[in-house]
Image: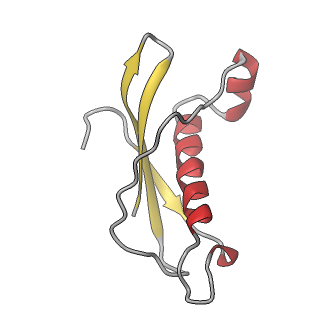
Amino acid sequence: MPSETIWEFPYELPRNAFNARDAARAGDIWRAFQDVAVGAAARAGWPPHRFRDYGAAFVVRSQIVVHHRETRFGVRLRGQSWVTRFRRDTLCSREVRLF
């Protein structure tokens, strides 16, 4: 775990995020990662409107996912996100964990 500020909060996948097997759909998991990253940025003082005011945005250039197991509907999840490094004062690497 990094020593930087880690933002953690509850996250719930909606019922429509699950298929007939009661497994979360991949697209909804990707959206969850995005929601956690945006939520952490907002908690750090950078809500979406501040990015717009600065003419800036999140751009995902690459993504690596480690999948441990599927989640089921109704399971209480936690989201965590933190910035692991900054480059040239504009680029950063952010990690997100959903568990």
**Nearest to the observer: residue 31 or residue 45:** 31
Which image quarter: residue 57? top right
Instruction: Give percent across and percent down for residue 20.
Output: 62, 89
Farthest residue to the front: give it.
Answer: 62
Q: Would residue 62 appear left or right of 85 to someone viewing this image? A: right
Instruction: Give percent across and percent down for residue 58.
Output: 60, 31
**Nearest to the observer: residue 59 or residue 9:** 59
Instruction: Give percent across and percent down for residue 27.
Output: 61, 62
Residue shown at 72%/18% (left/top)?
55
Residue shown at 56%/56% (left/top)?
30
Instruction: Give percent across and percent down for residue 9.
Output: 48, 54
> What colouring style does the render use?
secondary structure
User: On the rendered image, what quadrant is the C terminus found in?
Assistant: bottom left
Farthest residue to the bottom: give it.
Answer: 21
User: On the rendered image, what quadrant is the N terminus found in?
Assistant: top left
Residue 40's place in the image compared with 83, above or below, is: below
Q: Would residue 21 appear left or right of 89 to someone viewing this image? A: right
Residue shown at 65%/33% (left/top)?
47
Q: Would residue 90 appear left or right of 99 to someone viewing this image? A: right
Residue 31's place in the image compared with 62, above or below, is: below
**Number of marks drawn:** 0
Residue 91's place in the image compared with 37, above or below, is: above
Residue 71's place in the image compared with 12, above or below, is: below
**Nearest to the observer: residue 63 or residue 50:** 63
Residue shown at 62%/82% (left/top)?
19
